[in-house]
Image (cartoon, rainbow, N blue to C red):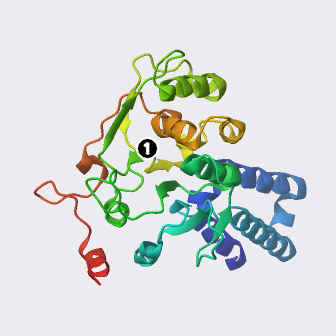
Amino acid sequence: MNLVFHPIKKFKDYILFIGFHRLILCFITLLFLFSTFGLSQFQSPQFITSTYKYINKTLNSILQRNQISQLAKIIVVSHFNENLDWLDLLVDDQISCIVYTRSSKPLPYQHKFVINKGREAVVYLQYIVDHYSNLPLSIAFVHAHRTSWHQKNPSDIVIALQALQWNKYNYMPLTSEKTRYEFKPISVDPQVKVNYELWQAVLQKELGPPPENGINAHCCATFVVKREAILAHPKIFYSNIMNYILASSYSDQLTGRTLEYTWHMIFGQPAHINYRTCDIFICDSNGMVSVPLDRKKKLNN
């Protein structure tokens, strides 16, 4: 009987990422076999052995198909020509990384080349489209620079990722810097007009009308989002946004920024959001962002 309990134990270990619907499928399969062959056949050594092989093969197949979705978290980097040495500081944190680059220079990380249009918006959308069926539990979408004017409290993206309370919320901005913008068909500001047109063309079907009072949210397209928030929309939704940006006659600065202003709404947040720093990051008793001690050593080396 050990042959029976071994795969059951193995099955138990993988329930969390196999999914409840697959668990039901395996149960129905076993029930069908039991009703078809009867109790005596079910207890035979030959049946036990064949059942063990079938379950083991099924589990291994599921594991291979879901190799990426097993990951708890991943960092998706939009790269042009920035220094990526800071990624080495995250190697021991068990955070996988993928770099989408526009650079022709070889990189020491897994990467893909994408058309040089749409800035980070197209990179993020490309990743979602590429991995829609096997997304990790949480994805951090970031720029390739370690520090910038908009990376505030914390001012270092490495500290932000190491102090982050991963998986706490469906959507979590990685900076406290704020931005606001409007969506109107007529405006002296071309960005306002582009915001409106892009929303009407590819966002409205899923999100409804554009926000009447504009948006007030965290700045500049560095955030973490859970898989379930991405899967709230069909894959074609993300493909349509990407295709619209790539085909647009407007500049990258305009179309790319529209996505900066709308990512939080795409992932289920209201138009106006304001996360407190210590709701997102680990903080010390003084309310300052705090990296765990074991990680501080690496930052100081």
Instruction: Specify the farthest residue to the right.
Output: 36
Along the horizontal axis of the image, is 73 left or right of 297? right
The residue lying at 68 percent from left, 71 percent from top is: 7
Q: Is residue 202 above or below residue 66?
A: above
Q: Is residue 23 visible?
A: no
- Return the residue nearer the eye: 162 or 177: 177
The residue lying at 83 percent from left, 76 percent from top is: 45
Q: How many marks?
A: 1
Along the horizontal axis of the image, is 110 left or right of 46? left
Instruction: Specify the farthest residue to the bottom.
Output: 301
Instruction: Specify the farthest residue to the left.
Output: 286
Q: Is residue 281 above or below residue 247?
A: below
Mark 1, residues whose alpha carbon is within 10 Å: few (<14), some, or many (≥20)? many
The residue lying at 65 percent from left, 39 percent from top is: 245
Q: Quadrant of residue 90?
A: bottom left
The quadrant in which the C terminus is found is bottom left
What is the x, y in percent for residue 138?
50, 54
Residue bearing mark 1: 171
The quadrant in which the N terminus is found is bottom right
Along the horizontal axis of the image, is 29 left or right of 105? right
Q: Quadrant of residue 204?
A: top right
Q: Secondary structure at mark 1?
A: strand
What is the x, y in percent for residue 54?
81, 68
The residue lying at 29 percent from left, 55 percent from top is: 281
- Return the residue nearer the eye: 153 or 94: 153
Q: Is residue 15 visible?
A: yes
Along the horizontal axis of the image, is 93 left or right of 236? left
What is the x, y in percent for residue 271?
41, 27
Type of amino acid at the residue the image marks with label 1: Tyr
Q: Is residue 280 above or below residue 97?
A: above
